[in-house]
Amino acid sequence: MKRCVIVGGAPIGNYQMIKEALRADDCMVYCDSGLRHETGIGRMADLIVGDFDSHENPGRDAETIVLPTEKDDTDTFFAVKEMMRRGYEDFLLIGMLGMRMDHSLGNLSILMHLYHAGKKALLLDDWSEMEIVGRTPSYIADRFPFFSVINLGGSARRIHIDNAKYPLAGSEIAWDYQYGISNEPLPGETASVYAEEGEVLLIRIFEQ
């Protein structure tokens, strides 16, 4: 399944890790100031989206969608919806977290939007990879030293965590008591997470 990579303007420190995560047939979409990562990532844009309030429109041959500065959608959210409209089912989001908390939280909500739309989505930054998990279990190999489970929407119930230092068996992580931080897969085991009701944010932490 061909994947769409959406690049935002948040800082990226480890371009090599990004390069290793990319596939040869990925469709690269750069959103406004995400264009500053194009050289570091080493992949030219297939599509450029933005109102260009934080980066100059490069004005080159790549397909470009110029958005108004006053709009409901952020440039990134518009790009995601546009690529969904074009039929993409698999998304990798990079350059999404850091600097402004409002944009970071908004970009995290894109994961939930894609999940509810039935799409596959992963958000990648310098320290971790993130995805939304519901009734279908997701797995954490022991090469990840830590992982966290957060009740992002506050509606998840009967959460299960297996093969981990701190297991759960049908318990609740309340929105105002996020105690699922910094768990660990058991040595030599693959941990798993799922929620019988609602969804949680799973964050796998890379070894630094």
Image (cartoon, rainbow, N blue to C red):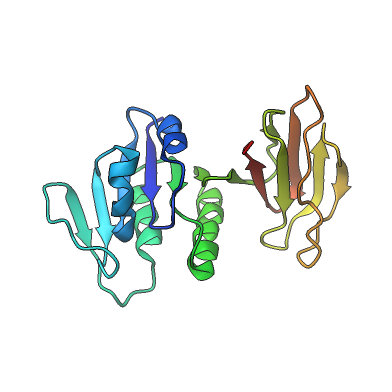
Residue at horizontal 26 percent and vertical 67 percent from the top: 51
Residue 56: x and y in percent read 20, 63
Residue 67: which quarter of the image?
Answer: bottom left
Q: Residue furthest bottom?
A: 70
Classify 74 as above or below 199. Answer: below
Of 204 and 98, nearer the camera is: 98
Q: Return the x and y of residue 22 as percentages of the image width and height.
A: 40, 33
Q: In the rendered image, which quarter is residue 44 located in?
A: top left
- Residue 182: x, y in percent? 76, 47
Question: Image quarter for residue 161?
Answer: top right
Residue drawn at the location 37% of the way across and 41% of the way down = 4
**Closer-to-camera residue (146/13):** 13
120 sits to left or right of 191? left
Instruction: Please identify the residue farthest to the top as the structure is shown.
Output: 188
Q: In the image, residue 203 lies at what x, y percent? A: 65, 46
Does residue 29 sit above or below 140 in this rendering?
below
Q: How many marks?
A: 0
Quadrant in which the C terminus appears: top right
**Residue 123 sits above or below residue 172 on the image:** above
Q: Does residue 133 sit above or below 21 in this rendering?
A: below
Quadrant in the picture for the N terminus: top left
Q: Is residue 193 left or right of residue 108?
A: right
User: Observer-nearest residue: 2 or 87?
Assistant: 2
- Residue at the image point whose x is 69% and y is 33% from the top: 140
